[in-house]
Image: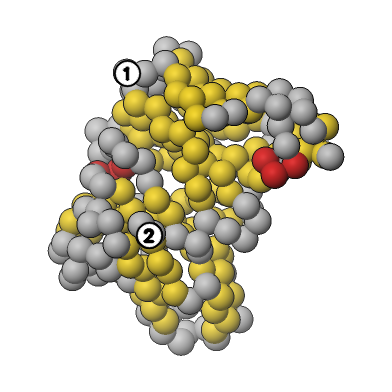
């Protein structure tokens, strides 16, 4: 059974810092991995989608990497801003039935 | 605008009173899914649908029903709600099965309280 872990559960950084969020998964046979952002009481907004054949994806200040063999993905946020404060979740699609499994998220606070 | 629309956003109901949460997408997506989100447990899949008239159970289907009579709609039905179904519910859709090529689009959520 696929398990997805995100550490730390919460992170507080001063504005302007570069930071890395981690996502690890137990079954390396994944189809893709997606990073989401969730604002309090709101839905999930897709940030980046990495297919299993890719090593990384970039969008603006965000860069996501994928290392299937070690069961890890990282989300790098450059020059963090208070507007980046949110919960970040990763989700993997894996298994014969192509099931989606979510991590429990990292709550990020960027302090002005 | 491409979106997934859920209604209602907030709902308070009493134990045992049947309710339906609607979900509609305007992107002609084949795959739709329902999740519930609880503190410390993350997002757990309730039911999913690969296409019209094709539905299957997720991880936590007990106490829920779904139907997919049209491609755009995927309602979640609670026949006899109980307090342990108090949660934040999300509907999601993707172009194809499990978001393999294009990823997921989520609705804004429905906060359900059962008293």
Side of B26 where A111 appears, left or right: right
SS type, badge 1: loop
Side of A15 where A39 appears, left or right: left
Mark 2 belongs to which subunit? B
At a point 58% along the width and 58% down the height, the residue shown is A42
SS type, badge 2: loop
Real-space Cα separation, disc 2 to disc 1, in angstroms: 31 Å
The residue that disc 1 covers is A53
Q: Is residue B83 above or below residue B98?
A: below
Residue A2 shows in this picture: no
On-image quarter of the C terminus of chain B: bottom right
Residue B40: image location, x then y, percent: 63, 48
Mark 1 belongs to which subunit? A
On-image quarter of the N terminus of chain B: bottom left
At a point 70% along the width and 44% down the height, the residue shown is A83
At a point 27% along the width and 68% down the height, the residue shown is B73
User: Toward the viewer: B14 or B108?
Assistant: B108
Residue B102 shows in this picture: yes
Q: Is residue A93 above or below residue B72?
A: above
The residue that disc 2 covers is B1
Q: How is the image coloured?
A: secondary structure
Dot in front, 2 or 1: 2
Image mark for residue A29: none
Q: Is residue A76 above or below residue B114?
A: above
At a point 16% along the width and 62% down the height, the residue shown is B52
Crowd around label 2: few <14 · some 14–19 · many ≥20 (10 Å): few
Residue B35: image location, x then y, percent: 44, 56
Q: Quadrant of residue A22?
A: top right
């Amino acid at each position: 059974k696929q398990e997805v872990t995100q550490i730390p559960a919460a992170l507080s950084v001063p504005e302007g810092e570069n930071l890395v969020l981690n996502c690890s998964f137990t079954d390396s046979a994944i189809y893709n991995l997606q990073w989401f952002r969730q604002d309090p009481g709101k839905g999930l907004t897709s940030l980046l989608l990495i297919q299993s054949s890719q090593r990384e994806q970039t969008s603006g200040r965000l860069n996501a990497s994928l290392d299937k063999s070690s069961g890890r993905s990282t989300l790098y946020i450059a020059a963090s801003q208070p507007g980046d404060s949110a919960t970040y979740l990763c989700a993997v699609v894996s298994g014969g039935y192509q099931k989606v499994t979510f991590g429990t998220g990292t709550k990020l606070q960027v302090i002005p | 605008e491409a979106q997934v629309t859920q209604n209602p956003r907030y709902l308070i109901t009493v134990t045992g009173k049947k309710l339906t949460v609607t979900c509609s997408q305007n992107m002609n997506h084949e795959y739709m899914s329902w999740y519930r989100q609880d503190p410390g447990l993350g997002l757990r899949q309730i039911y999913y649908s690969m296409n019209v008239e094709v539905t299957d159970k997720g991880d936590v289907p007990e106490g829920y029903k779904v139907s997919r009579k049209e491609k755009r709609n995927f309602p979640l039905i609670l026949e006899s709600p109980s307090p342990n179904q108090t949660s934040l519910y999300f509907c999601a859709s993707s172009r194809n099965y499990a978001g393999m090529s294009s990823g997921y689009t989520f609705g804004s959520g429905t906060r359900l309280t059962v008293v």
